[in-house]
Image: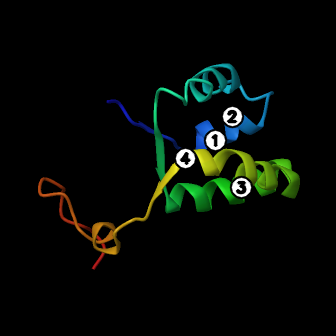
């Protein structure tokens, strides 16, 4: 089964009918009965900030009350935020 990772741009598009991605996001959202959605805590944090800035608290209410309950939310493993990929170039930050 396919799982769809939902990012900030998709969540924002679902909330703003004037967004250019609204038709595609809306179509995919309406297929939620057959395709499970998942996101992670960083996306939620970023999306709340963006929605509040552009659409106000009413938009955040819709996000929290209507969209997020239908999405699986994964927590980000703290170790994964500091771990480098094996083939990554050495960091310039000491």
Residue lying farthest to the left in this orientation? 86
Q: Which residue bears the numbered disc 2?
A: 13
Residue 76: percent from left, percent from top: 39, 65
- The residue depicted at 80 percent of the width and 27 percent of the height is 18
Numbered disc 3: secondary structure? helix
Task: Choose mark 4 or mark 1, whichever is in front.
Answer: 4
- The residue depicted at 51 percent of the width and 61 percent of the height is 42
Q: Earlier in the sequence, mark 3 or mark 2?
A: 2
Task: Name the foreground residue: 42 vs 27.
Answer: 27
Q: Residues within 10 Å of mark 4 (few under 14, many from 20)?
A: some
Q: Which residue bears the numbered disc 1?
A: 11
> How many marks are shown on the rendered structure?
4
Q: In the rendered image, which quarter contains the C terminus?
A: bottom left
Report the disc number at residue 64: 3
Task: Choose mark 2 or mark 4, whichever is in front.
Answer: 4
Q: Earlier in the sequence, mark 4 or mark 1?
A: 1
Question: Does residue 72 lie above or below 80 as drawn?
Answer: above
Q: Which residue bears the numbered disc 4?
A: 71
């Amino acid at each position: 089964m396919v799982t769809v990772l939902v990012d900030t741009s998709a969540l924002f598009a679902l909330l703003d009918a004037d967004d250019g991605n609204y038709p595609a996001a809306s179509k995919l959202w309406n297929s939620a009965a057959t395709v499970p959605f998942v996101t992670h805590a960083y996306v939620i944090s970023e999306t709340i900030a963006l929605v509040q800035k552009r659409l106000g608290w009413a938009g955040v209410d819709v996000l929290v009350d209507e969209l997020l309950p239908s999405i699986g939310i994964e927590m980000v493993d703290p170790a994964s935020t500091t771990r480098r990929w094996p083939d990554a170039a050495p960091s310039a930050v000491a």
